[in-house]
Each structure stands twice: as C-alpha cells, then as structure tokens.
Amino acid sequence: MAATLITLQPRPEIDPSVDHAIQAIVSGASTDATCTTDLAVGPWDFDTRPGYGPGSSMGDVIPTGSPRQGELPAEYREASDDELDERIRAAKATLGDRVVVLGHFYQREEVVRHADYVGDSFQLANAAKERPEAEAIVFCGVHFMAETADLLSRPDQAVILPNLAAGCSMADMADIDQVEECWEQLEDVLGDLETPDADGLVPVIPVTYMNSSAAIKGFVGRHGGIVCTSSNARTVLEWAFARGRRVLFFPDQHLGRNTAKAMGVPLEQMPMWNPRKPLGGSTAEVIEDSRVILWHGFCSVHRRFTVDQIEKARAEHPGVRVIVHPECPMDVVDAADEAGSTDIIRKAIAAAEEPTTFAIGTEINLVQRLAAQYPQHEIFCLDPVVCPCSTMYRIHPGYLAWVLESLVAGQVVNRITVPADVAEPATVALERMLAAKPNGAVK
Ligand code: 13P
Ligand code: SF4
C-alpha cells in the first residue's frame, strides 16, 4: 500500500500582542471576551485614581498610601505605537551600556521586546546583579521586583520602575504591621521564637514569597528566615525545616500549600492565618500541631483558573498537557498534569519534541507570547477571558520611553530605593535564597 502523504498546513501567524487582542475585542473585530474594556485605553487614565487599574486585580482593595504615578507627559500619552517603539530604541542606543532593561515574562509584548533580560522573578533578581557597570536598571515588572533589584544591585545604581502604580495586589495582602502582630501572637502560643530546642530547631521559621515588600523581607531576615520564589519554593522549605519545627509562609497561601503538600505535609497541619482575626482565626492547639502556617493571601490572576476549565480543555483537546503556575488554587494544581514557575512552563514547552497541545494556567501575556514563539504546538490559556495582571499591564511603552528619554537628558525619574535599615536584613534573607538553587517543578 502506498504511503499516505500528510501535508502539514502552516498555522496562521500568531500575534503575541495581548494589546492587539484587546483592541480587536473592543472594536468588535474579535468575538473573544475581555474582563473589562478599560484595558483598551492608556493606563495613564487610571494614574490619578486609587486602585490597581483594569485587569485581574481590579476588584482587590488597594491599601491607602500605595504609590501613585504622576502625570505622564502628553507627548508620551499621545504618541503612536510605532513612534514609541522608535523612541525607545533610539534612547537605548544612546544610553548603550549605561542602562539595562529587565522585563518580567508577564509584561506586554510591546515592552518585552526592548528588554535586555526577560525572565521570572528568580532570574531577574540574578540579572540585577549581572550588570554592575550600568548606571540604571529599568525594571519592567512590579514594585517588589524593583525593590529586590535595588537590594541586590550596587548602591550607586538607580533602579527605575517605569510606572509607580505597578504594585502587586498579592504582595499588598501582607503588611508589615500585620506580620509583626502575627509574630507576637505566635510567641504567646509557642514561647521564645529565637531559642532552638534540644534538636537545634526553633519553633518557627518565617518564609516570604518574593512577591512581598522589602519591609517583609527585612522582617524575615531579622528572624532567621528566607525568601523564596515559585522556582525554588521546595528547596527553601527544606532549608526552613532543617532549622525550625514549622514555617510561617506569606503572602501566597496557594504556593505555600501546593509546595508543602507535594512534600508530604498533611493539609490538617497547614492552618490559615487570617490577619483580621485573633490568632489568625485558629486555636493554640492547631498552631502547636502545625507544620506550615499559611497567610491568607492570593494572586487574583491565578485565582481565575478553575478545575472546570481544565475539564473543558481535556474534553475538547484529547491528549492536552495542562501546566499551571503554583499560585493557582490547590484543586487546580491537583487537576493539572504539571505545575511550575513561569520559567518552568516555558522550558516544558521548549523541550516538547512532538507537536503538542498545551493548556496553560498563567498570565495571558506569557501564554500568548509562547503561542507565537512555538507555532509547532497549539498553546492556549485555560481562562478564555483575556484578563492580564492589572499592575504588570500598567507598564506601557509610553512610560518606558519617558524613563529612558529622561535618562538621556540626565534625569533619573521613578527611582525605587529601599531604606538602609530595611535593606540590610532584607538582603540577608535574599542572599540566603540565592544560595539555594531553583529546584524545578512543584508537581
Ligand atoms: P514567577 O516569576 O516567580 O514565576 O512569579 C509569577 C508572578 O506572579 C510574578 O508576579
Ligand atoms: Fe502580583 Fe499576581 Fe500580578 Fe504577579 S501576577 S504581580 S502575583 S497580582
């Protein structure tokens, strides 16, 4: 029998731009859905209002006193996409090695294309140390990432966040006063928290996710604790269990729960700490029996993923590989095939040799870019609604052009500086983490 000739149809080119997808939805050219049409206008429309802005975190309560962005000059608000692109390229060319631009995977395509380093929060923390000769580090990411870059870079390097309103709603869910108060309450239940027992273990080691303020990292550093990211959470928890009876994990309950569960910690020994309730809403007995105390925080981007979406993907795409970020709720991680940080998701796709269908549970900008980069695979976001991270999305090329052209003119705008008394212990906690290598997937 003659062999059947199978002709592979070339896929139509995939546009990596989430902005283009949103503009098409809003203009009616696409029948897809977005969580809010406000995403189609410039982020500067929201700079004068309190709130995280349109996108996944738009319903979250922003703490009073959160940084606000001043008015972006009109020439940047009114410039076309092409003009901004050209101005960014020209400013970078003029600045040369004097500037390094870092871009998180969740940034818009129109921003990421100008980054010298693109990565997850662990990789970008390392990248911040790699260019000590650069006068300025422009961090296209969110506030806690820029603070971390300031902690890890040389004191004379200026770290710049293009839009000061690019915070993180999850990081804001643990404030330093609440954490200090929690520590005092734990001391009432567990006794002196600094003194090791006969086995050399202290009662509790604080572990903070990278997605937290420098003040929280400083707290952790002062109390024998450590920072983790989603790419090294297991290694870090092992580090902590080698030094303490239990862990206080903040702000992301899901990363804490998913990681500890994969290590065999029973759910009954992972009580939640709600900072608005006495003893976190728990009892002294439960705290005494606990192994991991989970702070009541979450990411509004990853909370959008559900088991129903996974079931639908499996029904419609037999053989689909479902990979989710460990900031997703536990039932979603359990229903997925794999769970890992943004870079682990990227590497899993890059390593797939056969054409594969991937359903991904993480921020849409990364998913869309991966779909465009790997056209041999079918890659789609589990969430059918286009709803980017509100705060990552506030870094628009207009702000990047503004901060770079200001540097060309000799002016540093939007500098992020961590005060020295916080910086010292926070750096200790970060250096402990950087000494612990990434450990791979959570599941
Ligand atoms: P990673 O970059 O560590 O994967 O974290 C994702 C995230 O939510 C960043 O804000
Ligand atoms: Fe924060 Fe979630 Fe956005 Fe990351 S994706 S910056 S954790 S709100």
Image (cartoon, rainbow, N blue to C red):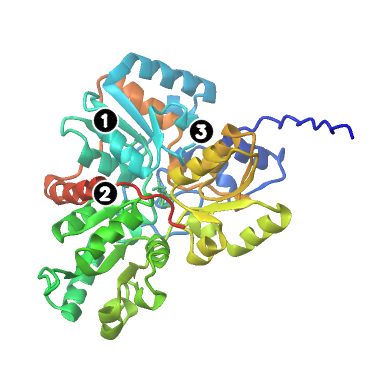
Task: Please give the name of the residue rendered at 36% of the width and 50% of the height, measured from the top-left corner.
Answer: 439
Tell me which amino acid carries mark 2. Ala
Where in the figure is residue 239, as x and y percent of width and height? 25, 58
CA–CA distance between discs 3 and 2? 31 Å
* Residue indicated by mark 2: 436
118 or 399, which lies in front? 118
Badge 2 marks a residue whose secondary structure is loop
Q: How crowded is mark 3: few (under 14 residues within 10 Å), some or many (20 or more)?
A: many
Tell me if I can see residue 40 in this picture.
yes
Is 134 displayed left or right of 195 in the figure? right
- Looking at the rendered structure, which numbered label has been put on residue 130? 1
Where in the figure is residue 26, as x and y percent of width and height? 65, 42
Where in the figure is residue 220, as x and y percent of width and height? 20, 58
Quadrant in which the N terminus appears: top right
* Residue indicated by mark 3: 109
Is 4 displayed left or right of 366 in the figure? right
CA–CA distance between discs 3 and 1? 24 Å
Badge 1 marks a residue whose secondary structure is helix
Q: Is residue 158 above or below residue 252?
A: above
